[in-house]
Amino acid sequence: MENEICERVARIRRELEEAACERWGRAPEIIAVSKTVAAPVVNLAKQAGIKRLGENRVQEILEKMPYLDASFQIDLIGRLQSNKVKYIIDKVSQIQSLDRESLAQEIDRRAGQRGVRMPVLVQVNIGNEPQKGGVAVEDTLTFARWAASLPGIKVRGLMAVMPDIDDEQALRPYFTRMRRLFEALRDEAITSTEIEELSMGMSGDYLLAAQEGATHVRIGSAIFGARTYA
Ligand SMILES: *Cc1c(COP(=O)(O)O)cnc(C)c1O
């Protein structure tokens, strides 16, 4: 198992470098999506050089965290209910799924109580899909600007979950649009912090994401194998 995870990460890293280096000068960082994967298995990713994990459920983070290698940073990547912010505000390194005002206000409030600024990415509903979270494309810059003005929030970039499209030609423009949004946000220099993370691409499409300028890819099943939901 250990070797398998190491080999998979090494292969993905090589592929990302090939896909990205010529155009962008560096490959995106891999965030290993460890949802549903047991802590002892997740910990094997450490040897593969993985530093950041993606988890999508608050309950699972709370249960698993005591067993995870303490040096991992955890990014929350799933939809977050406002009433659960208090449980994870001091546990996760970043919230990638900021997608509405009420959530921003609650993060701001809880971070303020602790005297910290919580790093977040604004999630964009790039495919304009009703079943997906994320702010509308046309609202993204206004929303990010507003969120960045809250003292408890540090906006560090954008995140998107791509539409489920198999055809590469049809999917690529969504990645390109995300990159343009990211560049527009970065060029605005709206905050005292730098806009430096564009999180897009998963197991099925990380090469496209790397080609189109992702700084971070979120990869689960291609590292840990197919998920089995209990
Ligand atoms: C599960 C998940 C991923 C990883 O999915 P894989 O296809 O297993 O790589 C990435 N991003 C989000 C938001 C997820 O929920």
Image (spheres, rainbow, N blue to C red):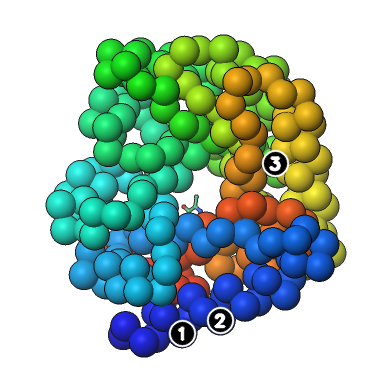
Q: Is mark 3 within 8 Å of ligand 1?
A: no
Task: Specify the amino acid type for callout 2.
Answer: Arg
Circle nearer the N terminus (1, 3): 1
**Would you name the residue on which mark 3 appears?**
126
- Find residue 147 and report its horizontal and vertical position in percent: 56, 18
> In this orientation, does residue 185 appear?
yes
Residue sitting at x 80%, y 50% = 176
Of residues 207 and 136, the one nearer the viewer is 207
Residue 99 image label: none
Task: Specify the amino acid type for callout 1.
Answer: Glu
Residue sitting at x 33%, y 40% = 92
**Would you name the residue on which mark 2 appears?**
11
In three-dimensional space, the C-alpha distance between marks 1 and 3, rounded to whole angstroms, equals 32 Å
Quadrant of the rendering where the C terminus is positioned: bottom left
Quarter of the view holding residue 21: bottom right
- Find residue 214 and report its horizontal and vertical position in percent: 67, 53
